[in-house]
Amino acid sequence: MLTIRVGEEEFFDESLGDEGEFIIRGGTEARFEHSLAALSKWESIHEKPFLGEGEKTNEELLDYIRCMIVTPDFPPEAFDALTEKNLEAINDYMNSKQTATWFSDDPGAPKSREVITADLIYHWMIEFSIPFECQNWHIHRLFTLIKVRNAKLAKPKKMNAAEAAQRRYDENERRKKQLGTSG
């Protein structure tokens, strides 16, 4: 979850003489979550995939930021006070990994051309028995959980003949080196 202050003012108070200080006043605290729930809200408004290939207009991106808000009773007019710094923080948050898990993806694996929509992600959650509370997680964290469940439930990949032969050869070489023999 990302928490930022929207609409705050910063100014220098010179009343303390040479030792003036910066004062921050006003603003509204806003909490945002880049989640499946936000994606679903946005897709219900725009009726197209958010994670698709196409470019989004500035208005569509601002709509998504509105869908991300989880602060109760957040005043709609406060969105007009979003600064470049606020938008940069939101963008950085949306692009953050939010997990320590990593995958060594098979470089030879074909890339899917499937269009990912909120409905497809909900399907994956049902398929992998992921509780619906996870729809409020950061979207990258949810994708990681889906990948982990997919990897854990996948059948082991069979080796072809060449890979099996190479594995036996490597194991024999390791044993010869370990035992100090020539075969």
Image (tube, rainbow, N blue to C red):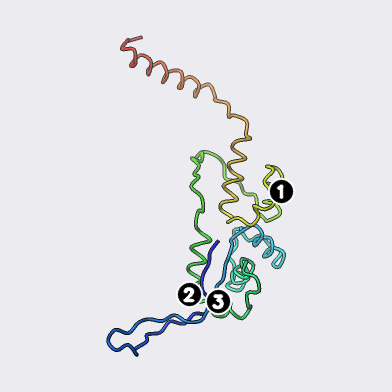
Q: What residue type is labelled 2?
A: Glu
Of tags 1 and 3, the one toward the viewer is: 3
In front here: 94 or 60? 94
Q: In this view, does 28 lie above or below 174?
A: below
Q: How far is mark 1 from mark 3, CA to CA? A: 36 Å
In front here: 121 or 108? 121
Compared across the picture, whether 53 is left or right of 12 comes to right
Which dot marks residue 123? Answer: 1
Q: Are marks 1 and 3 in contact (CB under 8 Å)?
A: no
Q: Which amino acid does label 3 sit on?
A: Thr
Secondary structure under tag 3 reads strand
Q: Is residue 73 above or below residue 161?
A: below
Residue at (46%, 22%) from the top-left corner? 167
Answer few, some or many: residues within 10 Å of disc 1's Cα (few below 14, many 20 plus, some between 14 and 19). few
Q: What residue type is labelled 1?
A: His
Counting from the top left corner in percent of width and height, residue 63 is at: 63, 71
Q: Mark 2 points at which residue?
A: 84
Which dot marks residue 2? Answer: none
Counting from the top left corner in percent of width and height, residue 89 is at: 48, 67
Counting from the top left corner in percent of width and height, residue 24 is at: 44, 80
Counting from the top left corner in percent of width and height, residue 53 is at: 59, 58
Which dot marks residue 28? Answer: 3
Q: How far is mark 1 from mark 2, CA to CA? A: 36 Å
Q: How far is mark 2 from mark 3, CA to CA? A: 16 Å
- Split into 4 quadrants, where in the image is the N terminus? bottom right
Mark before the other along the chain sequence, 2 or 3: 3
Answer few, some or many: residues within 10 Å of disc 2's Cα (few below 14, many 20 plus, some between 14 and 19). few
Mark before the other along the chain sequence, 1 or 3: 3
Quadrant in the picture for residue 11: bottom left
